[in-house]
């Protein structure tokens, strides 16, 4: 009998190892603090012989705990608070803690910090200095980024202060727990069990954001429910604010314009009605009693069915200013979205926001910001920068990016958004001549605004990895880092992230960054090459639908945007068409108006051109389109190969997830390419260029695809 | 300056400890394997010097890995596979692995196991023996339960085999990720990214279920969508089946009766139409090609708006048998739900299932089971056992329990369901004389059925703790354990669970079990005392609504159930009323028909009685009702005190969660009590008994409460 027991199987032995390893489930984001190799551990240990500071704020406690957590994670060593300086100590200091700091904190502002390898009382130390505990916290995260990322720790000398004042996430989270355009599971706000139950995820959320310098969060969807302003929900928001406060994060609320009518039976929501203004004033007072540092309101009004001041023949400024007056005594602000288009307005949708808002420049109260999406349509894979940037010099404009990838592959496609952010921020408005970049508009430097802001529509949900995939975390990371410093190159941010998310090992960082950097352009290629836009399927926006032409409003239909017919394709936004180009500064308008000078990447956004139009490469527009579709698909295949080659270096859980998602992306890139080609070929009847394969199915097959349970469509 | 650094704060020191501890976030359920004290560790080590087995099935690999994980967690020691016996070894053996086993596995069946401390080849070992690797896996979980639970490990001699063949979870999970009556977040099935992405949670789910002996799972809501039978969704189900298979878990699907019409344009869903039968046969063949061990179909037909065979003037048996023929060649079964009531049927709702199904006894194919809820209405805090139990001797009846607490406090109330399960299982149907318990009906012993089953509507979601609260995990646990052995006392199961979930320390187990054991009765007291039922608010079923009388169908209104008026309260189900008592066996019917012999806990279920009716205690019915409401609230207060006293012994995360939820439960118990009393007082105009406090608000206040975002109502 015993002989029968002798055969032992490798499968059992392999399974036995699994429980020992700590699973990389993505929950730790870029704050993983995994053990480093011995030499590096010794190096870190030499710079962390103890922590010296003073004060008793919760923020400082968080900073110290984070240092201890980080160093213990990386080195296995617990570091203790010190009561006196010692060589190798980490010193956290503000002007309030002492006067002998060898750093001038004068220009660091309230949130900046400096980190320096220096001597204090004869001992070599690492000094993190700031004017506030919040600045120290940000400095601590920076130091930990260096430590995790493999940077030298013995000769640090850096200063950093945020260029933009308000760095906010916008949650499109509904009170029933769903998330509009959320692809990472339900909302992390457990509204139902708040305020009683404050689960651990709230602090973890705040910690992750603080590590990037994000300092505010709008809790609820811009398609807001009035109920978010009831006492019960204010108490819930206050409970979250309480958790977030020591992390330097303020809460904001989206408001529904007709809340006074819905909640308290007012007969009107006219912003000039004294009762309406009084209602909002009382509501603001009520909120500030519960949340003394409440940030303010975000408003989507007169847009996509939302009510607003125009329903009462008032302007956006009338509406914004009335709300602004309500929060002003408390130091609050109003963020008024410029994402508007009217169902009865025949004007090119891309022009309507400008037409509505540009005339209001100078009419907004000084605690109002106008929040403008990066482009004039709606977060497409690529859009030219929004013409309002640079066009409203007397109004502080906030940038609104979409971190959640409604149009860029949703939860599964690897399409790093850093390059999109960078492209927009670096775009030159020429509003005050060359160099008037969008970044300078929103950081206030171009027009001298002190109130500045940037918002990202969050990609966060209850999925264990927060963002639906490991690589989607990079978009959250990039948004935060570039909100702090809009000049950071997307590639540098990708390198930072990859080092933190995986390892500083260049065998990982180099290929991962290479994958990331071209990935958004690949999505543009396989979805909307050469300036196409808004060709996705209806409602859920999952997959291609360039043939859709039967929706009630013209500007909901993809055919409105691409205008393909037998003779050509593209939206003529020159003077012979909608003349949207005229909304840009003259130098920009002139450049865009000519297809030969307009960037080819935006060609069909501004021009309707014959299929035979010659691209710069010499090939026809049609051939160039097809080649771009092919190139996009090929890029995904390249990413698959790269990722497969990384198997030995990546933990199994994250390797498997990314591998599975790339497989989905490959399939869907092909679907986008094939469906688009099948449709446009049905219009232009042109052959495919040599070497390009026929679509796998006929057009009817693509049209017949239906996805009743596609996510994010609440 | 240095002096300024000297003040060090306790808050920082406390925060510093947090990251080191492994957070008890509930994910590990009852499989925590936390370190045990030194003496116990030595004891366990002495019984786990190695593992001896043979074979290479994935199931066996899981069993061995689980042992290694458990022992390493408890003792820190890694245990190795052995190639020869050694004193203290754990031996896993089936008849196939050898012949000299000192255990007769003859009567253990395919899933049973024996565990014995014995000698093999002269060495003292612990032998786990079974007829299959699945039996070994169950045995391993049992041994680990003993080890974790603090049991003696040196003199084990036990045998265990399941009494019920099919032990299933029913997921009311929708394809869009929502969960009907789910209070633990969205569905754990990531339908959208299946089959490509199989996240780690699926295996963890299977492991948790296997540890309880659960051997099947119905993946989708009984309110089914036809799309779950499309090729795309069959592939997704197959991917899950692939993960679950080595854990001994089969998948089943709920089906929509009209799927042939919706998916393939058939003109009818008449079960006697040959085209319909052919469609289902082809569909079954298609499913079995993808999932060779597919379990079968669950059907909700002609109930609450679902289509079914009665739409074609066919019977439930006609429908079930047609489906049964489709799956029969593959060994599949059909579970046909008896939860039916008709919108146009004036008969007492409690009678309709019996009226529909009793006449069909003997007409069902031999691979059909009729799945019957524990009571005749709908998972109320208490219902008398369903009169179908014992009434259909020629039909195998499955029990359907609801683990998710739609009517028992949803995600937050601590209302341990073990006593409810036990009460139903022990109820005596008298179908074949005294001792004809419900347990004997469903385990097949009463009527000689070989096909036997029990289902629990799952309380599982993506919440990190799976079930929405730590204590809700106990309901999943209790369902699984009592499905394996329906004679297990609820208290013994509670003790087991508490020891595994927290610690075997009696300072924890005793008070926790005491809290649990009275908690369901407390909910009955503060919600539906003395046999009341169905008095909850409409739709979401959150909170009280005894006043509701305006819903379209009479049997949707609470007033239909309590029939309170100035003279009395209760539903007369005796011969003078609906005569529902006549659906029970004569001995039971006679006992129930007389308010003096009917159990007082079911009094108003069967009887309409004057408010002045004398209870056994001597007090009036009204005073007794109020005292029970008071008692329910007081019990929750007692639980709060008990839990607060456990603070030093419980980890902070789970302590805080339970404390917060008890606070919610206390508030809501008071609300239930006050709203109910305010309403019934408005009907009977009677004073409260001495010592009972007036409701906090007037009736209109309670009626005005509105909860548009209450969870679980999809």
Image (cartoon, coloured by chain):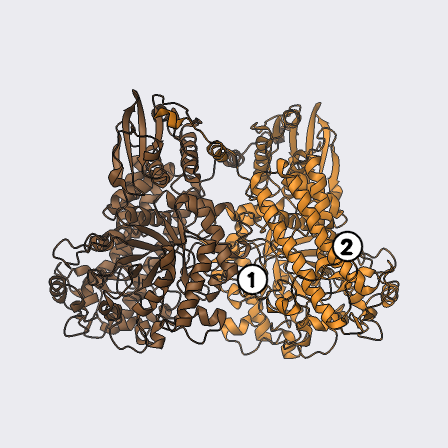
Chain colours: A orange, B brown
The Cα atoms of the two marked residues, 1 and 2, are separated by 30 Å
The percent position of residue B31, horizontal first and vertical second, equals 39, 39
Relative horizontal placement of residue B337, taking residue A316 as reference (left or right):
left
Relative horizontal placement of residue A264, taking residue A293 as reference (left or right):
left
Q: Nearer the viewer, mark 1 or mark 2?
A: 1
Any part of residue A132 in sight: no
Residue A643 sits in quarter: top right
Any part of residue B232 in sight: yes
- SS category of the residue bearing label 2: helix
Q: Which residue is mark 1?
A: A710
Residue lying farthest to the top in this orientation: B122
What is the chain identity of the residue bearing mark 1? Answer: A
Query: Depth check: A351 or A259 in front?
Result: A351
The percent position of residue A78, horizontal first and vertical second, equals 56, 28
Residue A423, numbered circle: 2
Which corner quadrant holds the N terminus of chain B? top right
What is the chain identity of the residue bearing mark 2? Answer: A
The percent position of residue B391, horizontal first and vertical second, equals 20, 63
Query: Depth check: B662 or B13 in front?
Result: B662
Query: Depth check: A313 or A182 in front?
Result: A182
User: Disc 1 or 2, which lies upstream in sequence?
Assistant: 2
Residue A367 sits in quarter: bottom right
Picture layout, residue B27 above or below residue A115: below
Which corner quadrant holds the C terminus of chain B? bottom left
């Amino acid at each position: 009998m015993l002989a029968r027991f002798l055969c032992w199987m490798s499968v059992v032995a392999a399974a036995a190892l699994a429980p020992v390893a700590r699973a990389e489930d993505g929950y730790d984001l870029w704050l993983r603090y995994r053990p480093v190799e011995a030499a590096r551990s010794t190096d870190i240990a030499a710079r962390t012989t103890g922590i010296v500071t003073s004060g008793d704020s919760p923020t400082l406690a968080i900073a110290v705990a984070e240092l201890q957590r980080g160093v213990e994670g990386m080195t296995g060593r617990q570091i203790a608070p010190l009561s006196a300086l010692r060589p190798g100590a980490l010193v956290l200091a503000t002007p309030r803690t002492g006067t002998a700091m060898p750093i001038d904190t004068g220009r660091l502002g309230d949130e900046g910090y400096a980190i320096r390898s220096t001597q204090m009382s004869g001992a070599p130390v690492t000094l993190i200095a700031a004017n506030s505990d919040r600045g120290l916290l940000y400095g601590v995260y920076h130091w930990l980024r260096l430590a995790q990322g493999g940077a030298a720790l013995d000769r640090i000398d850096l200063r950093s202060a945020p260029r933009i004042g308000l760095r906010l996430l916008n949650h499109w989270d509904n009170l029933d727990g769903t998330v509009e355009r959320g692809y990472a599971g339900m909302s992390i706000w457990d509204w139902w069990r708040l305020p009683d139950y404050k689960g651990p995820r709230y602090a973890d959320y705040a910690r992750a954001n603080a590590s990037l310098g994000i300092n505010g969060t709008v809790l609820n969807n811009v398609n807001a429910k009035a109920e978010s302003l009831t006492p019960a929900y204010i108490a819930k928001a206050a409970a979250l604010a309480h958790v977030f406060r020591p992390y330097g994060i303020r809460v904001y609320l989206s408001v529904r314009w007709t809340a006074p009518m819905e909640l308290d039976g007012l007969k009107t929501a006219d912003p000039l009605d004294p009762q309406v203004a009084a209602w909002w004033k009382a509501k603001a007072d009520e909120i500030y009693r519960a949340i003394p540092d409440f940030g303010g309101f975000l408003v989507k009004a007169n847009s996509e069915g939302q009510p607003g001041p125009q329903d009462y023949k008032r302007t956006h400024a009338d509406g914004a200013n009335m709300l602004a007056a309500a929060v002003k005594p408390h130091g609050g602000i109003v963020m008024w979205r410029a994402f508007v288009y009217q169902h009865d307005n025949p004007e090119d949708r891309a022009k309507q926001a400008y037409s509505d808002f540009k005339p209001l420049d100078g009419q907004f109260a000084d605690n109002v910001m106008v929040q403008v999406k990066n482009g004039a349509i709606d977060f497409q894979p690529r859009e030219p920068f929004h013409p309002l940037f640079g066009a409203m010099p007397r109004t502080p404009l906030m940038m609104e990016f979409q971190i959640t990838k409604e149009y860029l592959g949703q939860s599964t496609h690897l399409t790093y958004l850093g390059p999109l952010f960078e492209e927009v921020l670096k775009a030159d408005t020429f509003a005050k001549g060359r160099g008037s970049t969008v970044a300078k508009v929103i950081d206030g430097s171009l027009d001298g605004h002190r109130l500045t802001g940037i918002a990202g529509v969050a990609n966060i949900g209850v999925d264990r990895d927060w963002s639906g995939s490991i690589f989607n975390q990079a978009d959250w990371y990039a948004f935060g880092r570039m909100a702090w410093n809009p000049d950071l190159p997307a590639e540098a941010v990708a390198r930072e992230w990859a080092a933190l998310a995986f390892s500083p090992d260049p065998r990982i960082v180099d290929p991962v960054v290479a994958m990331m950097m071209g990935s958004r352009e690949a999505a543009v290629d396989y979805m909307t090459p050469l300036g196409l836009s808004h060709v996705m399927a209806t409602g859920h926006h999952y997959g291609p639908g360039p043939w859709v032409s039967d929706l009630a409003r013209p500007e909901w239909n993809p055919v409105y945007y691409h205008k393909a017919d037998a003779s050509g394709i593209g939206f003529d936004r020159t003077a012979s068409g909608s003349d949207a180009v005229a909304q840009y500064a003259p130098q920009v308008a002139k450049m865009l108006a000519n297809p030969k000078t307009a960037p080819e990447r935006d060609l069909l956004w501004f021009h309707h051109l014959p299929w035979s139009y010659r691209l710069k490469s010499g090939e026809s527009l049609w051939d160039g389109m097809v080649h771009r579709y092919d190139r996009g698909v090929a890029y995904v295949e390249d990413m698959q190969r790269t990722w497969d080659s990384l198997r030995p270096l990546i933990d199994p859980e994250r390797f498997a997830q990314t591998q599975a998602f790339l497989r989905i992306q490959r399939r869907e890139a092909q679907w986008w390419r094939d469906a688009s080609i099948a449709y446009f070929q049905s219009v232009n009847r042109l052959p495919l260029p040599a070497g390009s394969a026929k679509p796998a199915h006929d057009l009817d097959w693509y049209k017949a695809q239906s996805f009743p349970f596609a996510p994010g469509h609440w």
